[in-house]
Image: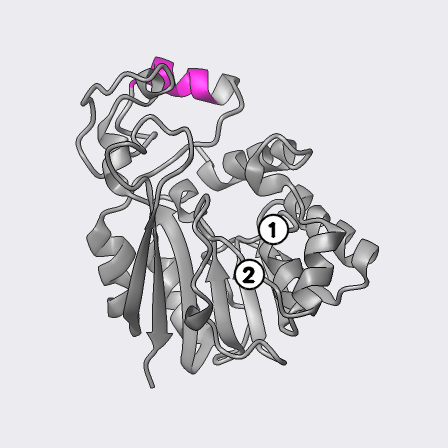
Amino acid sequence: MDVRAHNRDVWDSLGSGGSPWTRPVSSAEVEASRRGEWSIVVTPSVPVPRDWFPSLDGCRTLCLAGGGGQQGPILAAAGAEVTVLDFSEAQLARDQEVARRDGLDLTLVHADMTDLSRFEDHSFDLVVHPVANVYIPDVAPVWQEVARVLRPGGALIAGFFNPVVYVFDQDLLGDGELVVANALPYSELTSIDASTRQRLLDDGDPLQFSHTLADQIGGQGRAGLHVTDLLEDRRPGHPLAPYLPTHLATRAVRQG
């Protein structure tokens, strides 16, 4: 099946506000950002440290798979030159709404996160990639393309799931039960039976894929990105949050 097309359609349907990642920032947050009082998240709740960012004044920034009217408007209001790329037109519409409402200049691009061929080498100073690669089977093309479009010395800030989350039965997690069920890496094309997968499709859920830390973190290094820092986050209310970080974020710098 065409996983990307299915997941795009799901996010188009969620773009009406059914997910925390589809709720645009407020005008008050935009105004605070213009005053220099800004922060963003690329995982559920922990703000990205300010020292992970370069100066945002004129910073050529790509919000990669970052639609939803959140990171892009905040960074633009803080002075960055922002391009938002997303495979969901509904998610991009949230950014367009905020840009019109608050007089922001955003460039919106409808494309897959694995294909940045429209951008020349070294086009960006900063790439911000909130949790999104859980929806694609292979993350290596993402890191390779990011490394290509970043200038030497440019930074990538990326959020992603802790893969150990997917060891547990995802249905039972919703009921608060911790039942070990899956070998890693987890794939909703191969790790679950056909009837369970069909139920996910019928329910309009996106198909998900865990990725090894060797691919998430080591893969950045293999692409020419030097990881300089890492933070952990716990999604509020997640059954695993009392026991382990559900999400991670890394800062990496493009090598020359």
Q: Looking at numbered disc 2 in the image, what kind of residue is underneath it?
A: Cys
| Residue located at (42% from left, 73% from top) | 155
Q: Which mark is residue 63?
A: 2
Q: Position of residue 36 (x, y in %)?
A: 63, 70
Q: Secondary structure at mark 1?
A: loop
Q: Looking at numbered disc 1 in the image, what kind of residue is underneath it?
A: Gly
Look at the magenta stretch and give its main secondary structure: helix
Q: Position of residue 102 (x, y in %)?
A: 80, 58
Tell me, yes or no, whether the two marked residues, 2 and 1, touch with CB atoms within 8 Å. Answer: yes
Q: Does residue 244 appear to the left or right of 12 in the view shown? A: left
Q: Does residue 96 appear to the left or right of 150 in the view shown? A: right
- Marks 2 and 1, how far apart at CA: 8 Å
Q: Secondary structure at mark 2?
A: strand
Decide which of 87, 50 is in the foreground and name it. Answer: 50
Decide which of 121, 248 is in the foreground and name it. Answer: 248
Using the rendered view, name the quadrant where residue 189 is placed: top left
| Residue located at (66% from left, 74% from top) | 79
Using the rendered view, name the quadrant where residue 34 is placed: bottom right
* Residue with the mark numbered 1: 67
- Position of residue 95 relative to residue 234, above or below, is below
Q: What crowding class fits label 2: few (fewer than 14 Cα within 10 Å), some (14-19), or many (20 or more)?
A: many
Q: Quadrant of the C terminus?
A: bottom left
Query: What segment is highlighted magenta in the picture?
Result: 193-200
- Position of residue 153 relative to residue 49, above or below, is below
Using the rendered view, name the quadrant where residue 56 is placed: bottom right
Q: Position of residue 43 (x, y in %)?
A: 43, 48
